[in-house]
Amino acid sequence: MAGQLKPVAVPPPAVEAARHLARAREQVRQDLMRCRHRVSKLLLLHGCVYEASAWTKTHRRWLEAQRFEEAATELAYLDALAAVDGLVARKAALDERLSRLALEGTWSPTVARLRCFRGIDTLTALALCLEIGEFGRFQRPAQLASWLGLVPSLNQSGESETRGPITKTGSGIARRLLVEAAWHYLPRPSVGVALAERRAGQPAEVLQVALRAQRRLHRLYHRLRGRGKPGNIVSVAVARELACFLWAAAVV
């Protein structure tokens, strides 16, 4: 009666199981990043620097050609390189299973709609659906942005109000994916071949929302950058707006 109780969304068993698999893939991704850093730092310690793009096929051949004077160092290096290869294989297997899982279950229509947006493909759309759950449980898009922790914190004392950093509540995985997707709105709005294929067969209302998102987020990005805002603040602001557009596409 006092309004202190908050509703809690309990996911169905199928959604919870798929969420476990998606989070396992996220853990493998983090482990892979750490292992790659170990390899790079070990090489840097011995003055071995690769000048071109890292972790390509050419870079992989360069890594295999590296040799060290001490046998123990060579063994440590080969072990770290093997760990990278093992994690790459595990991540590929999980990616394949999650890609097939995106076509199954009650989340598949929402995944297809979210894929209409720039910077969001199958795995990102599936992870957002699993982390957020039912988009319709949020009455307004601002509620979704607040649940994701993409809104500024507020400190009130009397009549004064102070805005702080974002709250970072809700799912950290969903928040990271949205911030990464926000960087794709820096270039001028356009529809490439891959994005056009993802949009094929989707409702016209969803396509209109995705088109408005490209235009608005691109303008927002450059307006904030023109005002001298740091890149991380700009990307979070664009991610917050993107979450609202995703809500509109999911519930339309």
Image (cartoon, rainbow, N blue to C red):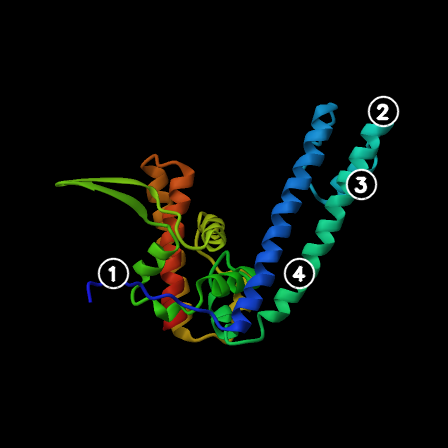
**Dot 2 and dot 1 residues touching (CB under 8 Å):** no
Q: Position of residue 82 (x, y in %)?
A: 78, 44
Looking at the rendered structure, the secondary structure element under dot 4 is helix
Which residue type does callout 2 highlight?
Answer: Glu
4 or 1: tag closer to the N-terminus = 1
Q: Which mark is residue 61?
A: 3
Q: Residues within 10 Å of mark 4 (few under 14, many from 20)?
A: some
**Of label 1 and label 3, which has the lower sequence position?**
1
Q: Tags 1 and 3 in contact by the CB under 8 Å rule? A: no
In the shown orientation, is residue 187 left or right of residue 146? right
* Cβ atoms under marks 4 and 3 closer than 8 Å: no
Q: Which residue is mark 4?
A: 94
Badge count: 4
Label 4 to label 1: alpha-carbon separation: 41 Å
- 248 to the left or right of 117: left
User: Which residue position holds label 2?
Assistant: 70
Q: Which residue is mark 1?
A: 4
Question: Residue at the spot x=30%, y=44% of the render?
Answer: 153
Q: Amino acid at mark 1?
A: Gln
